[in-house]
């Protein structure tokens, strides 16, 4: 199992969509929300993802395709 910590920034039109849930189910990735801030206009979530390296890559690609900005979280221990 691999672990990745990423920051997601959701555009306004995706804030109410179950994008993280859909990604988790579709790619068999376990998300763990570490921090979240959601307003009317933007959503930011720091997420720890666990799964196989291949599934993590596919899940992150899916998020980007949906229009979510994905940035790696640097300088924080994953465990």
Image (cartoon, rainbow, N blue to C red):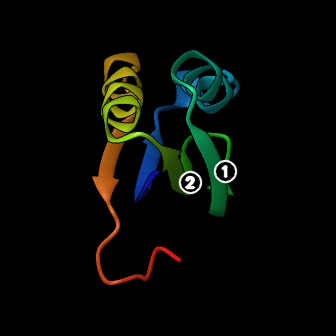
Q: Is residue 33 left or right of residue 70?
A: right
Within-10-Å neighbours for mark 1: few <14, some 14–19, many 20+: some
Q: Is residue 1 above or below residue 40?
A: below
Q: Nearer the viewer, residue 26 or 53?
A: 53
In the rendering, at what x and y percent does residue 26 appear?
57, 16
- At 40% across and 82% down in the image, what residue appears? 76
- At 60% across and 32% down in the image, what residue appears? 20
- At 70% across and 26% down in the image, what residue appears? 16
Q: Are marks 2 and 1 in contact (CB under 8 Å)?
A: yes
Q: Is residue 11 left or right of residue 60?
A: right
In the rendering, at what x and y percent does residue 64 appear?
32, 27
Q: Nearer the viewer, residue 69 or 60?
A: 60
**Residue hosting label 1:** 38
Q: Which mark is residue 45?
A: 2
For marks 2 and 1, give the one nearer the viewer: 2
Q: Is residue 25 above or below residue 4?
A: above
Question: Quick one: label 2 or label 1, which is nearer the N terminus?
Answer: 1
Tag 2's secondary structure? Answer: strand
């Amino acid at each position: 199992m691999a672990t990745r910590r990423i920051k997601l920034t959701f555009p306004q039109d995706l804030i109410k969509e179950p994008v993280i849930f859909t990604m988790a189910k579709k790619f068999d990735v376990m998300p763990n929300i570490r921090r979240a801030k959601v307003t009317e206009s933007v959503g930011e979530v720091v997420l720890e993802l666990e799964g196989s390296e291949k599934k993590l890559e596919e899940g992150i690609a899916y998020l980007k395709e949906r229009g979510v900005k994905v940035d790696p979280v640097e300088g924080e221990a994953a465990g």
